[in-house]
Amino acid sequence: MGANFYIRALMEAAAKRLTGRHVEILYQTPYSQRLGRAVNGTAQKSGGRGIITLEPDRPLVDIYKTFLHEAAHLAADWDRFEDSGQPGGVTVKVTYAVNQLHTSMETRAESQAHEWDAWATSRQKTTVGEKLLELAACYPGGVR
């Protein structure tokens, strides 16, 4: 498993700073109802909080990149998520009007994730733990 309890706690703290919301991190194989298959990560809204589910059996740097991408969805696309109203529920769907909207959301999330990582790297942070700690403690705002 690429991530541990310490990294999970840092991800939750960074997600709060980046999204402005309480976010729970789950390490389990995520399933996309829209795609009908397992994926590397998902972002959901449940009980008024965010849930990011990450595939644990990947290298830590890949888990980190997926985390940033999913956090970017929670930050930018919160209003597009349906809320299951059940804390801990993982059956929440994202509503997509058309595939074009989905592509736009993915492009925006990937761009935001890259910006957050570049910011942490510019502050001479090189490990995943250092980057997450820097994002959690010092990032000057959420989505730009």
Image (cartoon, rainbow, N blue to C red):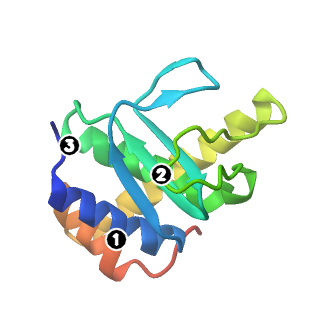
Q: Farthest residue in the right direction? A: 97
Q: Of label 1 and label 2, which has the lower sequence position? A: 1
Kindly identify the amino acid type of the residue bearing the numbered disc 3. Leu
Residue 43: x and y in percent read 52, 46
What's the CA distance linking mark 3 and mark 1?
17 Å
Instruction: Name the element at disc 1.
Output: helix
Q: Looking at the image, do the residues carrying marks 1 and 2 touch, with CB atoms under 8 Å apart?
A: no
Q: Which mark is residue 88?
A: 2
Q: Nearer the viewer, residue 134 or 28?
A: 28
Which of the image's four quarters has the N terminus? top left
- Residue appearing at x 45%, y 62% in the figure: 23
Q: Is residue 129 left or right of residue 93?
A: left
Q: Is residue 135 left or right of residue 83?
A: left
Residue 124: x and y in percent read 20, 69
Residue 13: x and y in percent read 34, 71
Q: Which residue is mark 3?
A: 60
- Residue appearing at x 64%, y 56% in the figure: 85
Q: Looking at the image, do the residues carrying marks 2 and 3 touch, with CB atoms under 8 Å apart?
A: no
Judge depth for marks 3 and 1 and give the one in front.
1
